[in-house]
Amino acid sequence: MKRATLAATAIVLVPLLAYPLVTIAGGAPRFPTREECIHPPVDGQQVDVVFGRFDSPQAAAGVRDEVISVGFVGTGVLPDGCGRWKVVLDGVPSIDVGREIQDEAQTVDLHPTLELASDG
Amino acid sequence: MQRLSWWLEWPAGPIRVGVAFLVAVAAVAVVLAYPGVLRKADREASGSSALSYADREIAGGNALVDDQLAVYAARGLIPEDATYHVDVSPDYEGDSDLTQGHVAGYYRYFLMPRRPAEDGPWIICYGCDLTAYGAGTEVVWQGDENISIARVRS
Amino acid sequence: MTVHALAGVAGLNALFLSSGAALLWAVRGFRDWVDVARLAGLAYIAGVIATGALWTLLLIAGVPFSLFLVLAVPVALTLGFVAIGRRSGRSLPTGGRLATGAPLIVTAVGIAVTGLLLEGLFRISRLSGLQWWDAWAFWIPKAKAIYYFGNLDEEFFTTLPGASYPPLVPVLDAAAFHVMGSPDVVTLHVQYWLFGVGFVWALAGLLAERVPGWILWPFVLLVLVAPRIGRRFHITEADLFLDFLFVLAAVLVVVWLLDRKRWRLVVATLLLCGMVLTKREGMLLAALLVAAALVASAREWRSTWPPLGIVAVATALVAAPWRIWYVVHGVAGEGPSDGGLDPTANAERLWPSMRLAFDVLLSSNYWSVLVPVTLGALLLAGLTRAWVLTSFFGTLVLLVTLGGGWITWAIPELPITQELGGNPIVRYMGSVALLCAAASALLLGAAWSSVTPRAKDDA
């Protein structure tokens, strides 16, 4: 390849590759999904015990009623910030307590997950 | 580089100067604007990236709907093959003057394939009088901004 | 916004490119791979329009719009054009030599600086929400209706605002939704950015034939930095898309007037067909473009007017089915309610309307220095007796501007204002501004080559 062609190739490629690389260096590209409203629990902070997420507040309310009927009093329905409603027992003081609630729920065939408390 | 006489010879010289001048004007305009456009692109991209999922999804509707939850509740509650009606009371005072005239159009976009219909069984009510729909009307979702979603049972 | 959606858009656009490249190969052929690279943008835009127009006409004819149709049409077009090319004896491109020396370096710098800006604009488009009133009020609802119901759903297409607007752009959106797997309006912005990239590439590729790089690239870049043009590449509305087609068609027609290569007129006709299927202003712009070509070629009317007549008839034939559809379905027409041709009606609005159009045309807040530079370029090209270019672009800029004034004058409901929500004049005049970029480059290129014999070697 001639020198001028090499120079021209470099003139085109260097900035066109450098710009995205510099941008990516600030963090990988995001692909936003509804999962971005699910935050993992953090040691030392309150957690939410979440019994499910639903597109419809009515469907969420139905599950909430079932959850309460098997003993998890205080469970409510809250919007999750990504267009869904979550059935949640909130204000759980720690991950350990949350795990105990999970174990208890499994005895009645419920499989809640732990998340960082919404206001935590 | 060309000699000065090449630029001054008659009649071609002035044409050459004119062409070079106009290209220079365009080039200077580009040079002056270019960094600003790149910076603005960077700012806008960062702004878009920082939006929450709901803010990005509702986008143009954020200035109209008053409560994002109402839009999501309508989508979650109204079946895809059902029809609905957006009823905005003339007295409804939303966060924006635009709500009154445009919120129904926004719901039409957001809720597709659901179809709007004056006599639809689902009512998205912005401060409206639900008693006007009869005794069989059931409020299935109530928001904080005097917005509710109701179903009329025939 | 998912990787799957982006991959779907990439696949669809590869199909646009393949069908357009096959079309160009069939009607023109490619000399070598450099030729292919130079015209790849035009091939892409031609593929978008060939595919999109066929989808649109099939949809109007009642063929269900499905993922199968989305994929089958561009594949069939590619195979069809390849068959035509083979039958015409076209050979495959081989090899290719780049320019050398300073022109090569100027081109490389131009591509790099333009590409960098396009990358910046891509970042805006990737995660943008649907903010614009027209987009969520009717363009995207129409696209969603096609996507969900597979037809021109009578309820939505007769009651949405802009009901008489032709459906090409919603059809392209719906096709993108199909390949994305959902009506992902965030990723859709990337599709519009790709239209913008295709246009810039096509424009630069077409102009590079006749304009030296040092004249060409400042104007290509000016398109991208002009406040009301490049920064709006990602917006999911039809205005800029229409302007892209208009400007490329204008360049093809005027260069055809100069060199009479038939393929230019074939591709220009395709783009004019795309214009009349995109927006109602597309009819007006297409008619004015043909009128300007008739004026610019009046001296040789025997050889130019018949082909231009065929172009006009073909465009009108493609425009007809949509007009029949909306008339049959009781949608009010596209023009002013009283026809807009009575000079005595709204006489008091005539001068303010025309002044508004010229004020918008000359506003550097919208178009940077594009318009004044074009006026200077018209003068220089006129002095060098580049009559065809001067008369074509001079006539077209004037006619389109007068057309903008006519729209405001003939529709009394429109306030005489540059306010975007009240009057479409600023959007409409984007077509003239974008035209000015192409015109300036061609006019200055012609003026330069007429006084600089070696300029052609530099081009």
Image: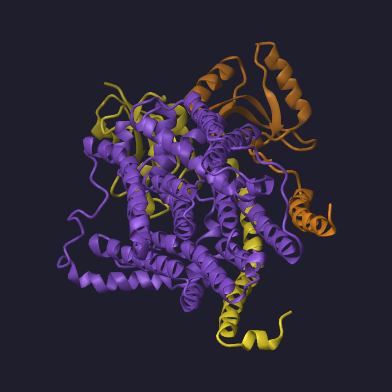
Chain colours: A orange, B yellow, C purple
Q: Residue at x 66, y 34 (%)?
A: C3
Percent position (x, y) of residue B146? 39, 42
Q: Is residue B40 above or below residue B131?
A: below
Percent position (x, y) of residue A18? 78, 53
> Based on the displayed image, in which of its 4 quarters is residue C274 positioned?
top left
Decide which of B135, C399 is in the foreground and name it.
C399
> Based on the displayed image, in which of its 4 quarters is residue A12 positioned?
bottom right
- The furthest residue to the left: C344
Number of marks in picture: 0
Specify the quadrant that holds the C terminus of chain C. bottom right
Q: Residue at x 50, y 23 (%)?
A: C68
Percent position (x, y) of residue C9? 58, 36
Would residue C123 appear left or right of C396 to someone viewing this image? right
Decide which of C316, C420 is in the foreground and name it.
C316
Q: Residue at x 46, y 51 (%)?
A: C245
Residue B112 showing in the rendered view: no
Residue C214 showing in the rendered view: yes
